[in-house]
Amino acid sequence: MELLGARVDYFGEIERLKVEMNAVILAHYYQEPAVQDLADFVGDSLALARQAQGTDADVIVFCGVHFMAETAKILNPGKTVVLPDLEAGCSLADSCPPEDFRRFIDERPGHTVVSYVNTSAAVKALSDICCTSTNAEEVIASIPEDTPIIFGPDKHLGRYLVEQTGREMVLWPGTCMVHVLFSERKIRQLKVRRPGAEVLAHPECEERVLRVADHVGSTSSLLKRVVESPAKEFIVATEPGIIHQMQKAAPEKEFVRAPGKGPEGACEACSECPHMRRNTLEKLYWCMRDLAPEITLDEDLRSRALSPIERMLEIG
Ligand code: 13P
Ligand code: SF4
């Protein structure tokens, strides 16, 4: 226990614990900057799953949300996987209860079920193949043309994929509580004030926001665009944690958070994912010190959820 009032050198202690327990720290782009800076690897949800699959560490410290850490555990039943805050959920995963999703599938026999990784293990276990926004088009292309598809749980990503791939899909009506809040009207107004700025948007945003975007893609795709684009200013319509990596990758460029639908002057933090931001530097230290909270999974459920994840990882 720390002495009352004693300051903890979180950076030093986390580094020490990492070596002591042969741990790897994996962080999503939406984590707070200090957590990203401590991680061994920062990436999008697909890259993080691949890192988890390939690691030889004994302990995976997952700085992201529950479904991401759960995916790491599904891939690594023999390893300890900890998440700084077990309550770090996801509105998309919550929008798709497994019992309801099972009924939805049963009502549509013969469909191939594609699930975004933003789902619980129980929903993955009902699915044929998983995808992320990075590889969704490739995953859909891998399904025979004459096979009907159910896609869940994000209806905005689903609609965008129907448009991109030309494949009809039955969509589950889930949404991300963060991405639906960006305001197309205010983004347009901001573009008038910053005519040289490019609008970057994650496909979980509403259709009208995607229509004003210059580039639509997963977090890693948006980051890549920042480096490759000739633009010097960007309006970022995704969780602003990623701006930390954008600034590192292109320090001479300027990044503005896309405005939300709230009243004029509404708080800037509104586009921060309340789940992702549950993880803090302190909680990261505590979870490594105590090896808790740990992700645990029933073995039968884990093995059923594994195959759609492995199918996804085999692609690309
Ligand atoms: P990426 O797969 O693009 O990293 O997105 C994850 C996510 O949760 C978006 O809200
Ligand atoms: Fe889930 Fe949205 Fe947060 Fe991503 S930003 S973890 S989809 S709630």
Image: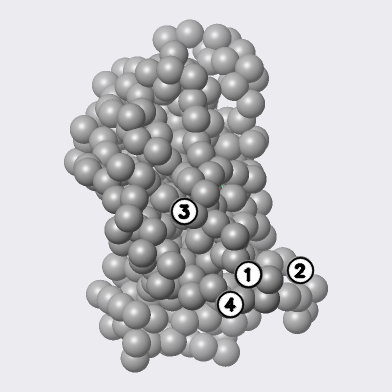
- Depth check: 178 or 192 in front? 178
Q: Nearer the viewer, mark 3 or mark 2?
A: 3
Kindly identify the residue that appears in the image at 59 percent across and 82 percent down: 190
Q: Secondary structure at mark 3?
A: helix
**Residue found 56% across the figure and 85% down from its top:** 192
Which residue is under mark 3?
288
Local packing at callout 2 (Cα closer than 10 Å; few below 14, some 14-19, many 20+) is few
Q: Residues within 10 Å of mark 3 (few under 14, many from 20)?
A: many
Disc 2, SS = loop
Q: Are marks 4 and 2 in contact (CB under 8 Å)?
A: no
- Discs 3/1, front: 1
Q: Say what amino acid the circle numbered 1 marks.
A: Leu
Mark 4, other Cα within 10 Å: few <14 / some 14–19 / many ≥20: few
User: Closer to the observer: label 4 or label 2?
Assistant: 4
Q: Which residue is mark 4?
A: 7
Name the amino acid, label 4. Answer: Arg
Query: Between marks 3 and 4, how big is the CA–CA gap?
Result: 17 Å
Q: Amino acid at mark 2?
A: Gly
Q: Quadrant of residue 163?
A: top left
Q: CA distance from mark 1 to mark 2?
A: 43 Å
The answer to whether residue 202 is seen in the rendering is yes
User: Please, what secondary structure does the residue beneath circle 4 have?
Assistant: loop
